[in-house]
Each structure stands twice: as C-alpha cells, then as structure tokens.
Image (cartoon, coloured by chain):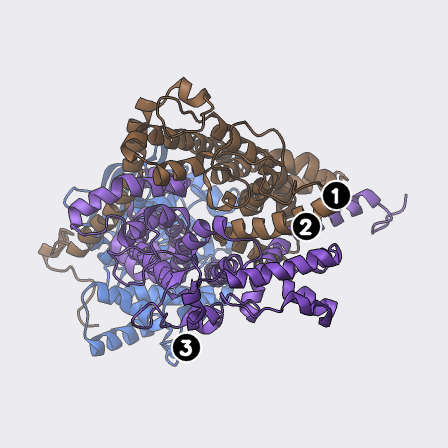
Amino acid sequence: MPAAPLKNVTVSAPDGPDDSAKETLIEVRDLSLYYGATRALTQITLPICPRLVTAFIGPSGCGKSTLLRCFNRMNDLIDNVRIEGAVRISGYDIYSRDVDVIELRKRVGMVFQKSNPFPKSVYENIAYGLRLQGHRNRADLDQIVEQSLRSAALWDEVKDRLHSSALGLSGGQQQRLCIARAIAIKPEIILMDEPASALDPIATARIEDLILDLKKQFTIVIVTHNMQQAARISDYTAFFYLGQLVEHDRTRKIFTNPTQKQTEDYVTGRFG
Amino acid sequence: MNRPPNPAPPDSAKSFRSERFDFASFFFTGLTGFATLLIVAILAVILLNIVVQGWESLSWRFISTIPKDNFFDPASTGVLPMIVGTTGRVFVMTIFVLPVGVITAIYLTEYAPSTSPLTRFIRAAVNNLAGVPSIVFGLFGLGFFINFVGRNLDALLDSPGPTWGQPAILWASLTLAVMTLPVVIVATEESLRAIPPGLREASLALGATKLQTILRVVLPQALPGIMTGGILAVSRAAGEVAPILFTGVAYYMANLPSKLTDQFMDLGYHVYVLSTQSPNIEQTRPILYATVLVLLMLTFALNFTAILIRARMRKKLRALG
Amino acid sequence: MGIQRGHRARPLEWLAERVIFTISLSAIMLILLIFIFVGREALPIFLGRMDSALIQETIPPERMNELDPEELRVYLDLSPRQFAGMDRDTLQMLMEVRQEALEEIPPEQLNDPDAHANTTAWRYLLFPHQWSDYDRPRYIWQPIGNIHKYNIVPLIVGSLKTTLIGLFFAVPISVGAAIYVSQLARPRVREIAKPTIELLSGIPSVVVGFFALLVMASVFQAVFQYETRLNAFVAGIALGFAVIPVVFSIAEDALTSVPRSYTQGALALGSSKWQAAWHIVLPAALPGVFAAVVLGFGRAIGETMIVLMVCSASVMSWSIFDSARSITTTIAAEMAEAVAGGHHYRMLFMLGAVLFAVTFVANLVGDIVIHRLKRKLEGRS
C-alpha cells in the first residue's frame, strides 16, 4: 500500500450535487453477512446515489469486495453464505424471494479484478450478453458492439481485429473489453472490483478516464486499493474496516477532513 | 444508445422478476442431473444385486475350503486357493511395482527439468502405458517374460524340463507390475507435488543435499500418497483377468501354490469360469454370486482405504498450506 | 573445505541420481519392449513368411543329402540351436514325419484348391474369399480345422460394433454428468457424486461381465424382445459401464480446469448457470471432452473380459442384436489352443499388435489434446 501523506493527495473529484437534491439508487440497510459462523460484514447501512461514482476503500479483508458482490448477488455462488438485513435497488429488495437473480445481474453489471474475456472473438465477447437478452438482428448487434467499444474507448484499437480472439489483446485492452461487455447490455449500475489493480499506470489512467466518462450514463460502484485512484475518480467514498462501515461521505471530505480518526490514519497511510 | 440507460425504466421492470420461465435451463439442468443420477443408480444396482444375492451363500466354510476336482458343486466347493492365488500375485506385484514407480515419480518431480523433451517423453510413455489394453499386457507377458526371459533362463540354468519358461505366478505378477506402473507413478507424483516447495528449500538451505532432502523431508511427507498409489494399483490388479490368462492362471489345481514358478488359481478367473463353463448355471448361481462378492470385497475394501487415506492427506495438506 | 561441484565431491549423491534417472526410463523402455515383443511374435505374419497351407511341398527323406544344412534347417522349421543339437537320424526321422503327415490328409481334400492356399496371406486376411464348401465369397474367421480361415474383418467389425454401442451409450451420459457435477451441482452434491461415480471404475471388468451375463442379458431380452439372448447390444451397454468412469473423469477434469472467472463473467452479464456452462465453459473445454471420448474409445476397444463373457460367436454382421466376436475376445479365447510359434499363435499376436497400435494412437491423440488444452487454459490464468 503506497503511503500517501494527507497533503499530497490531490482531490480532483468535483463536489457532488447538493446534498439535499440527492436521491438513493442502492440502499443498504443493516446488512450483515456470514460465511458459515464467521461474520464478514456487520450492520452496514449505506445509500448510493445514481450517476455518481462511489468508491469503497479499506485494507485487505475489510469486506469491501464482499459488499460489492452483494449488489448483484454473486455471493450466492458460495456455499454457506447467509445474509441479514436488506439491499434495495430502486426501492426493491433484491434478496426477496421472488427476485430473479439473472434478471438482477442483467441490470447490475460487473467488472472483475482480473480481466476475464471469454475465449471467443472480441465481437462475440460483447455480443454474448446481447444474445442472452434475445438480440438476434445482425445489424443491431453490429451497431451496439461498435457503440459499446467506442464508449469503452477501445474501438479504434480493435476495429480491425473484431473477429480475432480476445485473448490476444493486452491486459489493459482486455479490461476495457470487459467494461465494454458490461455496458453493452445497458445495466443501470456497474460494479467494479479493483478493475485496474493488475494494470500498469498508463492502462490504469485510461480506465480512470473511462470511468469518469461512463458516470454520465451509469451509476458506478468501485472497490479500490489505490487511494489516489479513489480520490481522482469518485464522488463519494466509503471506508471499511474489519467488516464495518467506518465512514461514508463526499470524497473531498473523506480525504481532507475525515470525521473518524481511523479514516484519517488510513488515508494518510499510517496503517493498511 | 437505443434507449436512455439510466432514467428509471417503467415500474414493472423494477421488481427484477423474470418475464418468462427459463425453460432451457430447467430442462438441461434436469437432464444432466438425471445423467448423474443414472450413473449412481447403475453402480448401486450392480452392488446391491451382488451383495444381497452373494451374502446368502457366503460362509466361512466357503472361504476356507480347497475344492476337490468338481468346483461347480455348491456343497463342497470353496475359494481358498483363489483367494491365496489372487493375494499372492498382487503381493509379488507390489514388490516390483512400488520401488520402480516411486523412483520414477521422484525423478519426474524432483530431478527432471520440467520442459526438457526427455521428461515430456517419459510422461507421454507413462500416460500411454496406462491406456494399453490389458490383453496386450497378457500377450507381452507371454512373449517377453515366458517365451524370452523364461526360456533363456531354462537354457542358461540347464533345467531338466521347462521350469521358468512356462506360465507361473512370478510372470503373472511381473506382467501386472508393468500394467499398474502408471497408477503408482501418477499417485506418487501427485503427492510429491502437493508438498510445499518451502519445505524443500528449508532443508536445502540448511546444507542438506538433494538426496538427503528427498529421503528425510520429501518422502515421509509423501508417504500417504505413495500408499494410496500402491493400494490403487493392488485393487486394480486384483480384479484384472486378461493379463494373467496366458501368464500364470490355472483352471484347477489340487494344491496351493508354493513356489514362484507354480501356477495358481484366481478369483477373477474363477468368476469367468463359473459363469461361462458351468454345466448347470442355476445350480452354480449361488456360489458364483458368493465368489463375486469375495472378489468385490477384496477390491472395494482396498479402494475405500485408498479414498480414506487420500481424503485425510488432503485435509492435512490444507491445514499446512 | 572446497565448494566443488560434480560427482567427485559427492560420489554417493551422483550415483543415486544416475540410478534414479535410469529407473525412470523404465516406462519408455516398457513401451518399447511391448512393441518389440508383441511385434516379434507377429512379425512373420506381417512379412508374409508364414505358410499355413494344409498341403506343403515335401522333400523325400532319401534326398536329405542333397540339401545343405541351412536349407534343411529352414525346411524342418528348427531354430539354429535345436538344429545343432540333433543328429542325422533324428533329422531324417523328422523328414519322414513331414511326409507321413501329407499322406494322412483325406484324399478328397488333396484336390481342394483351398488346401494349397497359404491363408495367412494378406488377401485372405482382409478380403472375402470363396471357400470351396461355401456358395459365395465370405468373411470367415475359423482357425480350427484342416483349412485355417483367418479373415480378420469379422473381428474388426465385432470390436467396432460393441465399442460404438458402448460409446453411444456412455458418452452422452458421462459428459452430461460431468457438466452437471462440475458446473451446475451444489458443492455438497459434487463432493458426493464425484467419488461415487469414480467408484464405478473400481468394479473389475470380470464382475461387469458377470452382471451383464446373468442379469442384464435376461432383462434386456424381456424388454427389447430380440432373438439372441447374448448379443453385441448387451455387450456394448456393459462396455459402456466400463467407459463411463473414464470419460466422466477426463471430461469433468477438463471442464473444471476452465477458469472460474469465465463463468463469473457470464453470470455477471445475467446468464443462467446452464447458459454459462453451455456457451462459455463447454466450448472452452471442448478439446478435453473430445480427448475423453478418444480415451474412452481406447478403453472400450481394448476391453476383454466383458465381451468375452457376454458374446463370442464370430459372425460377420453389422446388426447390433447379433452376436459379435471382438479382437480382444479372440485373443483371450484362442491363445490356449494355439501352438507356440505356429501360425494361429502368430496370427493372434498380429491381432494384438494391431490392437496395441490402435490404442497407442488413440492414447497419444488424447494425451496431446489434453496437454495443449491445459497449457492454453493455464497460460492465461
């Protein structure tokens, strides 16, 4: 963890809209999560606003990724996971019995820590999600694939090799392809789990630019290890420690004038 | 974009309820689940059939009797010579296959440069050996061990008649050792690989030589895996009939085998004889089921032991790493 | 204390390494030995050096002196060693035996053209021949009798018939189960199902054969209402039991080695577990599934006891409800009656060599495919 003295952190993120004006898209209420008998998240309550970037920060094992995976129920894949409390998206409890997980995941996209393009062509990678939604028309597909690649700032680099294997792209390109794949099906929310942690600084910068661009259309929740990254791109930041939400506020506030001592210690690099 | 993405979609979609039932998923999950169930059912039917029918005719007398010439007679027959023959041949086999298999596995994991063509060649040979049909091993045993090694031994030792150059428990065991070599190699390799490299490095860093490291650190750790390999080889060999058909098995012998050059009776071969050569299959049926049960108990007991040891080993390794 | 390298510093260590290395070559050596010694016994057939004709040309014993020793040795079919150990009288007696054997042939066969035919020639092995007591050219394997009929086509057809039935039965079931166990089942179900299915491979094939013979054959006949109780269909299904664990564990292994991140990526896009398995995991693991089928084929075509116990009549027929005799069955059933070194014996070894070559290729192909797949999948994980 690079130690970042408080005064050197540049907070370029703009102030969020007026506090009073904000609505809530994802509402986490009293959420606790257990792996078997171990509690991984404790009583989290947190609102997430639409069309802003919210960053989750905290030391390894603090539960930030686990919380992220609650939003599209990827935790369901693990045995022995038990959840208390509620997560509401647009006011609807996504853990209620009649929720179709697959429908949920179509509307809450996800980008993983390690880029995971399918072993198919660039084009097929993006078309896959669209085909799942029943898009069959070739012209439509072509158009959406191009749009998504343009939105992910990848079009110019891959337009000549759309039909060659996605595994031939560089790491950064693969990750942007995964982002393009996620936005192609037009989710409302995009979850990003340390999307740039495996990339070099230049590729990271491009992903960050992309995120700032995407927030005009999507609500983005990003887990990051890199505090400068959180400072640069997010509007709100939530700091987690040992499965608990320590502080959640405007990013500028968290990085310049945190309320909690723990938060201050962490963002100034005194632990973690 | 075709539709504006974020402004909230109509309320009906908010519920995250699927518009239609995903029939394909339901159908294919069911279908593949059924396939799994079918395999388990086949196993269960075979085992139950044998255990239920075999148990009735199984008795201590049956297990401990040496049959007189007519072993189709349920009242007087027994399977002692077959048990002795089968156990004997796998025991002799183990003596040959374990050292060779373990040493080969040690070479492959500890010494061999992992990318060299020779290593890949050895691995390919091991994998290929595992797929050679068992009857071909039988032919090999006949052509190599009996007709080549055995006859030359006879000529060399000036035996009065064919002593070595004829089917014998020794040749059957050697043939089986060749057949089960890959089983031992693969199991040992797996357990050697599971040992964290840190252990080896720690020993080497203390000034131990490679051989010392292998003998004192690596092998003791790998022992359960090597045992598993040995047991799997034994259980595989115990049930095989094709490789011993021409290399040592006898249709009937009045006495138990006493030398390595004797022929022997065998449980698996006896099952074959009872089910295909019986003059009256209805009369033979009970002893046939009992013989099969004895054979199954022998191989399955070994298999279960191997699975148990392996499970314990995995648990221990998980605790280590 | 010098920091030396090499065998001089530690002779024992050096020696041990040499020994370990040498022993590790045993697998290669054994494969070679199998090739050599199965091939050696079959070589005269491959080279066309055997003569199985009933009526052999004989040289009258009186003309023994006109032959040089080498010619005499070849004529009497003796090894140099045996030949050296015999005196003149013994040799002459052997020549007389040869001639007497000719005189014992029933007169009606002396004019039979088949009695002069060397039936181990390739055209008799592979193509139909009109034997004198048959009305039209036929494929016949009938090694016992005065005229040895060695056509191997019925055996090949028998092997393929039972093997294909076995694969048609076993492959869909095992691949389906592999998909279910590796992709769809809950972890707890997987932990029970996988070892249970693998336990099937612990049942000796003689037991599967016994079960097919005593139980399945009757049940199937009652269900399907066919004529021959023991036929290729029963044998094929029973073969399938032996093939299932092979195909299952290789296919399951290939499917499991596809990185979890592929599945997660698909699920995050809103595909169901089944769609992720079908669209993403299965295509990625397809070479492994192919290899599983190839190795299953090798296992089935080499299986002996099951087919031997269930059906063994050598009839040339493609019907699955007829009996069939496979290559393996023939070797197992007839080797006991064959005279070592005779043409029947060599013919059986030739079948073994062919079988070995076929399974060798199948194993090699399967092995290479799996190796490539693993490298490809691991290369990026």
Task: Measure the alpha-carbon separation of dots 3 and 1.
Answer: 82 Å
Q: Mark number for residue B112?
A: none
- Residue behind mark 3: A157
Foreground: A247 or B290? Answer: B290
At label 1, which amino acid type do we have?
Answer: Asp
Chain letter of mark 3 equals: A
Give the letter of the brown chain. Answer: B
Task: Give residue C117's position: percent from left, percent from top.
Answer: 47, 71
The kind of secondary structure element at disc 3 is helix
Q: Residue furthest top?
A: B60
Chain under numbered label 2:
B
> Which amino acid is tagged 2?
Tyr
Real-space Cα separation, disc 1 to disc 2, in angstroms = 43 Å
Q: Which chain is blue?
A: A
Q: Is residue C345 left or right of residue B160?
A: left
Q: Quadrant of residue C11?
A: top right
Residue A66 location in percent, x, y?
A: 35, 44
- Give the mark nearest the N terminus, 1 or 2: 2
- The residue to which callout 1 is attached is B158
